[in-house]
């Protein structure tokens, strides 16, 4: 499996295992099976609520000699209620304790949205800080502090527009990764071009359409990526699955991709995209599927009185 190389020559495997929505009692086994068959990139987040189980699994596979720490790429994310500069290292240390690690390879600001320290999921307008009250530059300074103290090797953002990245004007260390929703229905070509010019890697989440996300995040009559006839035709031509086509599409564009699965068969199937190749015509056909459709549209941050709007969020 190919990797993406950073300026210091650290390498992030282009295919990783996502752990959002992986159930307790299943995620640890999935991580161990993934590592056993060759995965070396595991994507985590504090808000997923499963880092302690993942940490136990990581410790066990390393103790068993299946893998060493320096062979793994572990990512996690800072949640919205720890955006104050002094809170960022505290949150990261909690993640490291849960994951049973001494450092992360990559730490991301999960959303450009800030909530009060005692608020996990906001329910009313007063639960938020606006970005005027809690600027991203302050949060980013906390991320840089974590680099300087050796808690993490690389830092980046998630769900950030070009405008949000540009607002990090005081950065001493520029973001190295932006993790965003990416798939043929939401191709984000402008963002891809911007990141290529500015030495920022993109990581694609929800690459298969996130069919198993919470019902509250779903809309009526959503378009299906997996059942798209163009994707199906290309899959048939390669004797592979629609999911494999969608994952390979992401890799062909130079973006890392983090499909979630706890099914051993699908874990292996996803890894096999290393042997798949889409030609220019197939990529062109997939390019025509663009419709600007978000499965994770951020509406949950835009309740009445919230300082955040969809227009402001996605700029």
Image (cartoon, grey):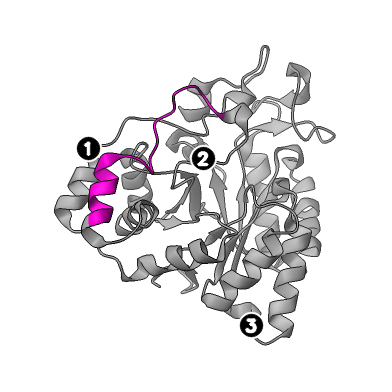
In three-dimensional space, the C-alpha distance between marks 1 and 2, rounded to whole angstroms, equals: 22 Å
Q: How far apart are marks 3 and 2 (CA)?
A: 34 Å
Q: Which residue lies furthest to the bottom in this view?
A: 65
How far from the left and from the top, in percent, is residue 145?
A: 70, 56
Residue drawn at 60 percent across, 51 percent down = 108
Residue 247 in the image, given as x and y percentages of width and height? 38, 55
Q: Give residue 160's position: percent from left, percent from top.
A: 51, 39
Q: Is residue 4 left or right of residue 313?
A: left
Say few, some or many: other residues with alpha carbon within 10 Å of mark 2 (under 14 / 14 to 19 / 20 or more).
some
Q: Is residue 28 magenta?
A: no
- State the SS at label 2: loop
Is 304 positioned to the left or the right of 220 in the image? right
Q: What element carries label 3?
A: loop
- Tell me where residue 44 appears, x and y as whole percent: 64, 56
Residue at mark 1 to residue at mark 3: CA–CA distance: 42 Å
Residue 101 appearing in the image: no
* Residue 222 is a magenta residue: yes
Image quadrant in which the C terminus is located = top left
Question: Which residue is labeled 3 in the image?
Answer: 68
Say which label, 3 or 2, has the lower sequence index: 3
Q: Which residue lies furthest to the right in this view?
A: 118
The residue singled out by tag 2 in the image is 211
Q: Name the residue under label 1.
A: 288
Work out whether mark 1 precedes mark 3 in sequence or the reverse, and give the earlier one.
Answer: 3
Closer to us: 196 or 239? 239
Q: What element carries label 1?
A: loop
Judged by depth in the image, the label closer to the viewer, 3 or 2, is: 2
Foreground mark, 1 or 3, reads 1
Against 122, residue 252 (above or below) is below
Q: Residue at x 57, y 60 (%)?
A: 263
Side of 12 where 188 appears, left or right: left
């Amino acid at each position: 499996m190919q990797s993406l190389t950073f300026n210091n020559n650290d390498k992030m495997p282009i295919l990783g295992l996502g752990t959002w929505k992986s159930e307790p009692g299943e995620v640890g086994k999935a991580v161990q099976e993934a590592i056993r068959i060759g995965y070396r990139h595991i994507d985590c987040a504090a808000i997923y609520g499963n880092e302690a189980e993942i940490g136990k699994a990581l410790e066990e596979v390393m103790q068993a000699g299946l893998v060493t720490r320096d062979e793994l790429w572990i990512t996690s994310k800072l949640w919205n209620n720890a955006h104050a500069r002094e809170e960022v290292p505290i949150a990261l240390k909690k993640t490291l304790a849960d994951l049973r690690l001494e450092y992360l390879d990559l730490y991301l600001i999960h959303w450009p949205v800030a909530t009060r320290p005692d608020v996990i999921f906001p329910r009313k307008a007063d639960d938020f800080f606006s970005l005027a009250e809690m600027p991203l530059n302050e949060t980013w300074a906390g991320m840089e502090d974590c680099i300087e103290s050796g808690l993490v090797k690389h830092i980046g953002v998630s769900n950030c527009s070009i405008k949000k990245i540009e607002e990090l004007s005081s950065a001493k260390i520029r973001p190295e990764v932006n993790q965003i929703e990416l798939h043929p229905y939401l191709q984000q070509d402008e963002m891809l071009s911007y990141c290529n010019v500015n030495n920022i890697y993109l990581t694609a989440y929800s690459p298969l359409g996130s069919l198993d996300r919470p019902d509250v995040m779903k809309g009526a009559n959503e378009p299906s990526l997996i059942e798209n006839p163009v994707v199906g035709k290309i899959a048939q031509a390669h004797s592979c699955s629609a999911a494999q086509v969608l994952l390979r599409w992401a890799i062909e564009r130079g973006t890392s991709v983090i499909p979630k699965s706890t099914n051993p068969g699908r874990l292996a199937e996803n890894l096999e995209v290393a042997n798949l190749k889409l030609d220019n015509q197939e990529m062109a056909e997939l390019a025509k599927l663009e419709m600007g459709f978000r499965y994770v549209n951020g509406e949950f941050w835009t309740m009445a009185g919230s300082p955040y709007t969809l227009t402001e969020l996605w700029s």
